[in-house]
Amino acid sequence: MKPKFWFVIAGMTAVLALIIALVTLLSTGTGPRSYVAKNYTRAAQLDIRGDDDNKAYTSRKAPSVVSQEITSSWDPISQYVDGTGVYLRYSDDAVIIQPHRGGSVIHVMETEEAYRHYHGVVGGVWGWSSPHGQSFRGRGPGSGK
């Protein structure tokens, strides 16, 4: 067989391997949302009603242990801990870990929805700023009036 034939076969094999790698990477997802989905038990009955993006999971481990597991894989932008739970803020998602039946319930939701739902807890801690300043009225003369 000619060497050109083997180059064609090697090229086709490399392209096939690249396609398989990309499909695997994209289907497994990355980030705290996919990490929680892979490592904890789905508990749809504990989803927060009215938020279709919210997903609840459970663990037999304490909230502090679950938080340590998640933050060792994905560093949050902001983290707040009080007697009600652990509140992890990421760029797109928030992970809320609260005590539940000797273990934990883990809520994963969009950051904005988490802020609205848990504002009483994280409002003064997470801070909030809109990328375009919509939440701040002091952008200059005549704005925000």
Image: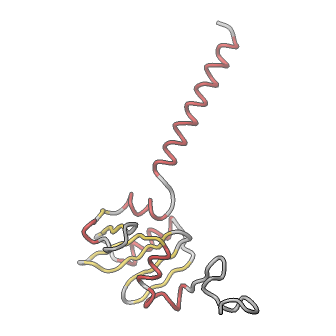
Q: Is residue 27 left or right of residue 16?
A: left
Q: Residue at x 51, y 37 (%)?
A: 20
Residue at the image point whose x is 54% and y is 84% from the top: 126
| Residue 125 in the image, given as x and y percentages of width and height | 53, 89
Residue 35: x and y, percent? 44, 61
Q: How many marks?
A: 0
> Is 69 placed above or below 124 here?
above
Viewer-closest of 97 and 68: 97
Q: Is residue 43 left or right of residue 144?
A: left
> Dividing the image into 4 quarters, which one contains the N terminus?
top right
Q: Quadrant of residue 116?
A: bottom left
- Above or below, 64 relative to 122: above
Which residue is painted at 43% across and 91% down in the image?
120
Image: 128 above or below 59: below
Residue situated furthest top in the rendering: 1
Relative to 62, residue 3 above or below: above
The image shows residue 145 at horizontal and vertical percentages of: 65, 93
Q: Position of residue 109 (x, y in %)?
A: 43, 70
